[in-house]
Amino acid sequence: MNIYVRFETAFRRAGDAAALLCPGGEDWTYARLVAEVDRAVGALAEWGVGIGDRVLVQAEKTPEAVALYLACVKSGAVYVPINTAYTKPEVEYFIADCEPSLFVAGGSFDSDLPVAILDSQGSGSFWRGTAPASTPAADRADDDLAAIIYTSGTTGRSKGAMLTHANLLSNAETLCVAWGWRDDDVLLHALPIFHVHGLFVALHCAFMNATPVIFLPRFDVAALIGELPGATVLMGVPTFYTRLLEEGTFDAGSCANMRLFISGSAPLTEQTFAAFEQRTGFRILERYGMSETLMNTSNPLGGERVAGTVGFALTGIAVRVADDEGNELPPGEVGNIELRGPNVFKGYWRQPEKTAAEFRDDGFFVTGDMGIMDGQGRLAIVGRTKDLVISGGYNIYPKEVEALLDGMPEVVESAVIGVPHADFGEAVVAVLVVRGNVVDQTRVDAYLAGKLARYKQPKRVVCVDDLPRNAMGKVQKNVLRETYADLLEP
Ligand code: MLC
Ligand code: AMP
């Protein structure tokens, strides 16, 4: 079924109850959200978007952008959100890969495609002054696509994870139960809405129950603390929690109305977990997910939440720790985290070989994360087989950065690694072998400007004579990570 049918039933029942509360802006009721979704459905039809067509969206976080997302789903189009930080060459890759019939941008963008503007005020050419469509939601089968979420590939090129209506609906239903969503919950939302965390995990819990969302345009610690008294649930990346703890004004009193703090997208350290409990009395609930699978495991709402673990498999999802052939390992042994369930994506967009390579014959998806499971089924993530840096909850694939750095005339070769960083958890460092003049940070910044989103760019550049290699000639990134472990956090 079309997931929007489920949402719309809840929205209509909620009527004039608050949907999106926008501090400093106009609040939307659920009735207004339904009307705006229908207006956006009308606009999509005017732009010629049909069932199964991709709509690529790089827009600011506004209520109108939420309406656009829901309208795509309602019309049977495939929603493809991308990070607002991406530069033009990055966006051009997504255009070429997903071949959208419409690109909705935050500002003017030179392209052969139809480009609609949804500016930060939520106005712009997208709307075309159209009348709202009163058509019912498009008929969609469970395995029809609702969204493609790009997630970077090991080759350095992003792959589109195809998520179906059934993936989204089953995960939303599961999370509402696992986290005991209540009719009086108020979600404090400060995440971006171009990733699964902010878009699906957070918003869907609220939408399934048509409960209010305090909708902040971005994470700002002072604004977040200001809104906490009106909220009951916060979902964030670990950086949210470390930044909250840096604020002297943040204490148990700030959380008087809260019932649940949830963390994910990157490892929450045991120190942050403990410091947060000491300051507020709350034990942060950590869960584990991915773009390809939505949420997989969660610490319990009712039972013991153990720091440094991501809890148990969610209902209906099988999680195993396996060897390189996919054989399940006994509890206590480290191996590949693999999983199967209604949450697991349909495959990578137009990449059947890559899809096949990441699934076992018995249907388990190989996540690229390494884990260890105890005898009770509680999972801890201990590393990754994929060469990936997670910085402030954003994924950065070293290959993509290295490919650009290697294009610098002075660079002989490069290795990009993640090193510990107090604010972002991990931060990108580039280790370069250069010819002639030493390359410094300013030169690298200037070279990458306009080519690569700023958050992917190295926070520090180091020049060396040689990169450490193993007997096979492969760069030993573990050696580099050890060497530079204290570079940013002495
Ligand atoms: C911003 N910057 C970052 C960064 N975010 N650098 C590295 N890593 C990041 N995550 C840089 C900017 O480029 C800029 O650089 C400077 O920091 C200030 O930018 P900003 O926009 O003002 O930053 P800020 O608002 O403080 O953003 C930090 C943040 C944000 C942590 C709030 O990154 C964020 O919202 N992260 C959440 C990501 C997320 O939603 N992930 C979910 C993925 S889904 P300069 O040098 O130009 O000043 C997933 C699955 C799952 O993983 O399990 O959930
Ligand atoms: P993404 O591709 O952006 O969806 O990122 C998914 C990856 O984020 C996972 O494969 C994990 O490596 C990581 N991740 C998500 N949640 C957690 C968590 N709670 N702890 C550690 N890593 C996590």
Image: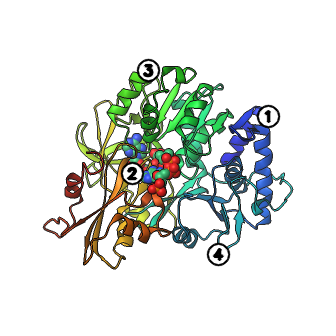
Q: Residue at x 51, y 68 (%)?
A: 90
Q: Amino acid at mark 2?
A: Ile
Please give left or right for residue 176 compared with residue 369 in the image.
right
Q: Which badge, 3 or 1, comes first in the chain's sequence? A: 1
Helix, strand or loop at label 2? It is strand
Q: Quadrant of residue 75?
A: bottom right
Question: Dot 4: within a 10 Å radius of its alpha carbon, few (fewer than 14), some, or many (20 or more) residues?
Answer: few
Q: Which residue is mark 4?
A: 111
Q: Which residue is mark 3?
A: 281
Q: Residue at x 45, y 28 (%)?
A: 248
Instruction: Give me the C-alpha separation between circle 2 and circle 3.
Output: 28 Å
- Quadrant of the frame with the C terminus: top left
Instruction: Give me the C-alpha separation between circle 3 and circle 1.
Output: 36 Å
Describe the colour scheme in one phrase: rainbow
Asked if the residue under mark 3 is in contact with the one under mark 4, i.e. CB atoms within 8 Å, the reply is no
- Give the foreground label among 1 and 4: 4
- Is 65 situated above or below 172? below
Q: Which residue is mark 1?
A: 15
Q: Residue at x 21, y 52 (%)?
A: 482
Q: Which badge, 4 or 2, comes first in the chain's sequence? A: 4
Q: Position of residue 465 (x, y in %)?
A: 18, 70
Q: Amino acid at mark 4?
A: Ser
> In the image, which disc is placed on residue 342?
none
- Is 251 situated above or below 145? above
Q: Position of residue 59 (x, y in %)?
A: 64, 57
Q: Amino acid at mark 1?
A: Gly
Q: Which residue is mark 2?
A: 390
